Image (cartoon, rainbow, N blue to C red):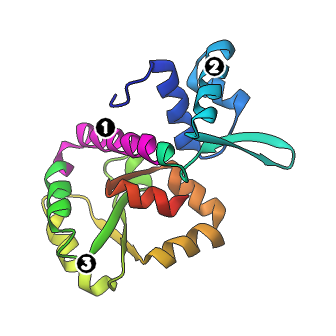
Amino acid sequence: MFLPITKSCYKILRVIYTNLRVKVSKLLQLARVSQKIGYKHLEELLSTGIIKEVKENGIRSLMPNLTTRAGQLIFSLMELEFEYELINTYPELKESLVLLRDKAHEMSIDSAVIFGDFLKKRGNQDIDLMVISELKDNNILPLLKKCFSSINNQLKVRVLSKAGFNDLKESKPEAFRNFFNYHVCVLNPQLFLRLSS
């Protein structure tokens, strides 16, 4: 755990981040923390701007506050934690991810996110990779295939511009929530979080 916080606070942050919008009662149940401790952490996280409260149809939910610097920093560290968990679970990915980071500038890739079934503990699935870049697919795909050539899984790539990412988020909010729940940003989590806010 990279974040210098208590285990109970980390559990709360992780549930909020991986569920995007969660009711307080469901949050405390999923995080497995007592109400007293849970509400204490929630008060601190809300007051520092790391999380925010939203109301939909009169129902109070909590979500990451990706518009504040504190929220972006905390959840960037959480993305780094998820990447280390991914590499520990699938060590064969480490070489590919190092190559991706090394070649990202050359390929004009601004950010990259692994998402979908591969992360749901089904490592034999295709690897879905979303790339944020202003270049077209055919310019990026050959280099990406080379980066991931050492693994047996097939690579399925979706290239989006920053505007395309925002369009996806705005036009298909439910699909975006599902995507966000099962993702690991493996390149430039700060940009990914800014675009996701």
**Disc 1/disc 2 C-alpha distance (Å):** 28 Å
Q: Nearer the viewer, residue 115 or 117?
A: 115
- Which is nearer the N-term, disc 1 or disc 2? 2
Marks 1 & 2, CB-CB < 8 Å contact: no
Name the residue located 45 percent from the left edge and 43 percent from the top edge: 75
Q: Which residue is mark 2?
A: 40
Check disc 1: other Cα within 10 Å, few if <14, some if 14-19, many if 20+: few
Specify whether residue 143 is in view.
Answer: yes
**Mark carried by residue 141:** 3
Residue extent of the magenta highlight: 72-93
Name the residue located 59 percent from the left edge and 46 percent from the top edge: 20
Q: Is residue 92 magenta?
A: yes
Amino acid at the residue labelled 3:
Leu
- Residue 73: quadrant of the picture: top left
Name the residue located 50 percent from the left edge and 71 percent from the top edge: 165
**Mark carried by residue 85:** 1
Name the residue located 12 percent from the left edge and 59 percent from the top edge: 150
Amino acid at the residue labelled 2:
Lys
- Residue 39: quadrant of the picture: top right
Disc tally is: 3
